[in-house]
Amino acid sequence: MRSVKAIFIKQAKDMTKNFSVLLMFIIFPIVAFVMTRFVASANEDIPDTMFATMMAGIFIGMGLVQSACGVIAEDREKKSLRFLVIAGVKPMSYLLGIGGVILAAALLTSIAFAYIGGLFPLGYASSFLESEFAAFMAVMISGAVASIILGATIGILSKNQQAATGISMPFALVLGFGPMLAQFNEQAERIVSVFYTQQINVVVNDFASGLIQPLTVIWINIAVLAVLFVLAYARKGLRD
């Protein structure tokens, strides 16, 4: 736990100085707010939640993957990852430290999306756990975990930040915009149904559909991605 805490503090300080990473947590809620305020509010046919949940899904699939990827690639490029591995830091300790900071930032961003879309903690529900806000936060945080692990894996396998950006972009585009395409194409929906971002889309478009199946698919994704991260860390962690 000591190594996790040390990495968490280090990354929190580094993240405040990295404008390109911070921007990922700011720009998506801003776009959601503007579209909700000036488009959804002015059109009765557009639900208040539409743009908030749409941008939330893109943030999870695109913004977080690239953020985590960039952070890890920066560590590799600066050789700090090499020193951490030599010092005996385990892959999960490193992932928990780095991922914890990004997850905390993603939590705040997810709350912003919820309030922009009018998903308040209670709303019309009789309890917090039954509220749309709770369901939204459950799939958002679970999806954030998956994206952080995926981004970290790509970052570990990349030589530098430039390479990491290039490698992560196709994944980010498919995960971020795949669910949007699935709304208009049944074949695309079948293809992306195995992805965690599509399960987020399923829940936010119909909160009455339940959480068991979507969360199960998301956490299967997380388990697979965690194994890939450990393998990538073991293979590339000590290399320049």
Image (tube, helix red, strand yellow):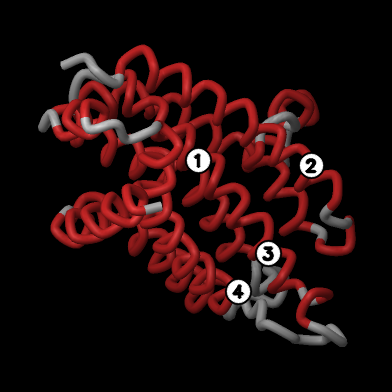
Which numbered disc flags the more N-terminal residue, 1 or 4?
4
Estimate the x, y position of residue 131 in percent, counting from the top left: 78, 76
Q: Describe residue 81's horizontal placement relative to residue 209 as left or right.
A: left
Which numbered disc flags the more N-terminal residue, 1 or 2?
1
Neighbours of disc 4 within 10 Å: few (<14), some (14-19), many (20+)? many
Neighbours of disc 3 within 10 Å: few (<14), some (14-19), many (20+)? many
Q: Nearer the viewer, residue 126 or 82?
A: 82
Neighbours of disc 1 within 10 Å: few (<14), some (14-19), many (20+)? many
Using the image, determine if residue 20 lies above or below residue 50: above
Q: Residue at x 54, y 76 (%)?
A: 116
Q: Residue at x 28, y 35 (%)?
A: 72
Disc assigned to residue 147: 1
**Element marked by disc 4:** loop
Which numbered disc flags the more N-terminal residue, 2 or 4?
4
Disc assigned to residue 216: 2
Report how far apart the C-alphas of labels 1 and 4 lie in the structure: 22 Å
Camera-near label (3 vs 2) is 2
Please name the amino acid that badge 2 sits on: Thr
Which residue has dot 3 on it?
136
Camera-near label (2 vs 4) is 2
Report how far apart the C-alphas of labels 3 and 2 lie in the structure: 15 Å
Report how far apart the C-alphas of labels 3 and 1 lie in the structure: 16 Å
**Element marked by disc 1:** helix
Using the image, determine if residue 8 lies above or below residue 90: below
Camera-near label (1 vs 4) is 1
Report how far apart the C-alphas of labels 1 and 2 lie in the structure: 16 Å
Which residue has dot 4 on it?
117
Using the image, determine if residue 53 lies above or below residue 164: below
**Element marked by disc 2:** helix
